[in-house]
Image: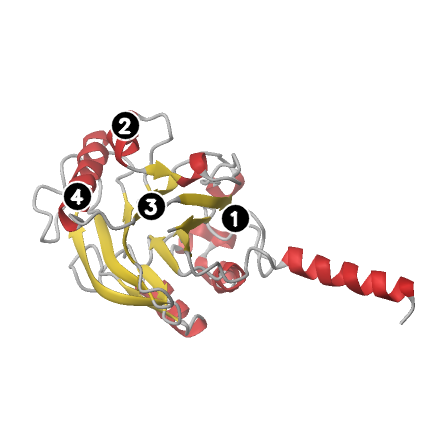
Amino acid sequence: MNILSSVLCAAAALSAFAFNAYAAKPSQDEVKVISYNIRVINSKDGANEWKYRAAATPAMIKDYAPDIFGLQEAMPGHLEYLAKALPKYASVGVGREDGVSKGEHMSIFYNTKTIKLEKWGTYWLSETPDVPSKGWDAACKRTATWALLTVKSTGKQFFYVNTHLDHRGAEAQQKGLDLIVSRIAQMNPEGLPMILTGDFNVEPDNPVLAELNTRMLDAKNTAMKTDKRATFNGWGSRALVIDYIYYSGFSACPEYETIVRQYEGVPYISDHYPVVARLKF
């Protein structure tokens, strides 16, 4: 092989490595998490309806290969499709309307090759959190799904909570998040690493986040490598930061990204962009 051929081969190998670097398996001391408001299945979305953009979601998940990901607004149709398209992942969650299957799910998906599910549950963001209910001034029933998970390769455990705060009620936003913070403290007396993801429907300077910011870290603000992109796109009509990955008990967040790339020729994977972070134990 001549020198020019050697150089070209090395350059090609380096380029391939760089292109696939984020999708590569994280180190055994890390967990990779995605938070993603998948957008309800709504025929009024026209060209952005789920049936036209469905293929983009498993393509994105396979590209980034998270250990875990949390969906907001997941409907039974989403879950059935993803169960077939992503056989390496299992999920937990219930419908917010009846505590079984009706309505939106705050689903937690986990890669069964890297993560073991220990236990999980769902509660409602309301004055009666253990039964299906609407809280305070909320427009809708809202839930949080939690799971205790173990990294199979190391035996390290962590908690994961996934939620969606109300889009209208300011009191429901505040008291709903207060309830989550309180429940996190109750469920985790040992101080295991904790991840909280979701569509909070408030921007970073909103006082709703004040107490949470004293207890957990925002991955977007603390990652060694990050971005300043908006997470809500409104199908290209708006730009807001309302989707979050918070964490505590991890030593660092090496990388955070708002996933704006297109998949399967779909302009917008949802009216929200997924967000992804690597968290180091």
Residue 229 locus on image (x, y percent):
52, 37
Task: Please report whichever mark, 4 or 2, sits nearer to the chain's N-terminal start.
Answer: 4
Task: Tell me which amino acid carries mark 1.
Answer: Ile
- Residue at 19 percent across and 31 percent down: it is 171
User: The N terminus appears in which quarter of the rendering?
Assistant: bottom right
Q: Which of the pair 149/197 is nearer the observer?
A: 149
Tag 1's secondary structure?
Answer: loop
Q: Circle 3 sits on which residue?
A: 198
Q: Which residue is mark 2?
A: 210
**In the rendered structure, which amino acid carries the disc numbered 3?**
Gly
Name which residue type carries label 2: Ala
Residue 142 image label: none
Left/right of residue 85 with respect to residue 9 in the rendered view: left
Disc 3 crowd rating (10 Å Cα; few below 14, some 14-19, many 20+) is many
Front tag of 4 and 3: 4
Q: Which residue is mark 1?
A: 259
**Could you tell me residue 114's position as x and y percent?**
39, 67
